Image: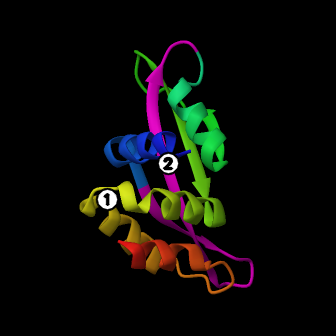
Amino acid sequence: MGPLLIWAAGFFDGEGSTVCRSTRHPNGHFIHSLGVSVTQAGNDGVPSELKELQNLFGGSTYKEKRLFPGKQKYKWQARSKMARTALASMLLYLHEVKQEQADQARVRCVDRRDLGQAWELERRRH
């Protein structure tokens, strides 16, 4: 999976985003989840690049609501554990700016039940 992972990291580095989403639980507490996504335009269904990210890391692809005339936009996204796994897998190949963005989002989204050792192991290797 080496070359494919390197491609995915480069593609994500240029086109992807990492976020921390907060959702209010019915009990009033906020639940934070890490999310990664890539948006691409296309007129023939979900672009193959997004399908490849889904094959590699899981998550989902979907058509975004069209706000303006022109090409349709599609999005791949993964959340929580899948997002952490995707980032940990690509970490060594991401540019330092994207690594920092990913790390900041991860820190904001700390969920002790979902923190795997993979992230820290990859971080130490770099």
- Residue 118 in view here: yes
Residue 112 rendering spot, x and y as whole percentages = 63, 87
Residue 92 rendering spot, x and y as whole percentages = 39, 61
Quadrant of image for the N terminus? top right
Return the residue at label 2.
37
Q: Is residue 71 left or right of residue 84?
A: left
The magenta span reads 18-44
Is 10 magenta? The answer is no
Is 43 magenta? The answer is yes
Quadrant of image for the C terminus? bottom left
Residue at horizontal 66 percent and vertical 78 percent from the top: 114
Q: Quadrant of residue 22?
A: bottom right
Return the residue at label 1.
98
Between label 1 and label 2, give the one nearer the viewer. Answer: 1
Residue at horizontal 40 percent and vertical 15 percent from the top: 70
- Residue 64 in view here: no
